[in-house]
Image (tube, helix red, strand yellow):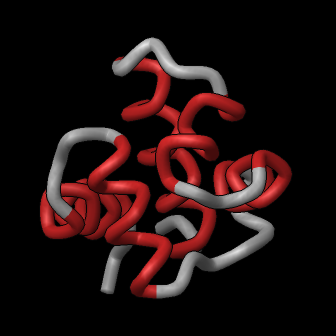
Amino acid sequence: MENSNVAFGKVLASLRQSARLSQEELAERADIHRTYVSQVERGLKSPTLIVLFRLASALETTPSRILKQVEAKVSL
């Protein structure tokens, strides 16, 4: 069982790497700061709903697809 922030961070990092984006590129596309992307990927920060939607859009996916992957990593 993983912490939900850690699970979200791993999913985000995996999706970002699959899209061949740097943290800086993802941050720019999502209109958030690069250090915030780093903190989310390391499980130190929990994104707001608005940030989730921005990240999903930047990764050309949906928030529900991201959350489904996170849900699979976390035992609720």
The percent position of residue 41, horizontal first and vertical second, equals 66, 50
Whether residue 34 sits left or right of residue 13 in the image: it is: right
What is the quadrant of residue 75 in the picture?
A: bottom left
Give the residue drawn at x 26%, y 67%: 67
The percent position of residue 72, horizontal first and vertical second, equals 24, 60
**Most extreme residue toward the top, as rendered?**
20
For the C terminus, the image quarter is bottom left
Q: Does 1 sit above or below residue 26? A: below
Give the residue drawn at x 47%, y 68%: 1
Which residue occupies the foreground of this view, 60 or 38? 60
Q: Does 34 sit above or below residue 56? A: above
What is the quadrant of residue 31 in the picture?
A: bottom right
Give the residue drawn at x 46%, y 31%: 16
User: How many discs appear?
Assistant: 0
Q: Does 39 sit above or below residue 48? A: above
The percent position of residue 36, horizontal first and vertical second, equals 77, 60
Whether residue 62 sits left or right of residue 66 in the image: it is: left
**Most extreme residue toward the right, as rendered?**
35
Which residue occupies the foreground of this view, 69 or 48? 48
The percent position of residue 48, horizontal first and vertical second, equals 52, 85
Which residue occupies the foreground of this view, 8 or 26? 26
Whether residue 46 sits left or right of residue 11 in the image: it is: right
Give the residue drawn at x 32%, y 40%: 59
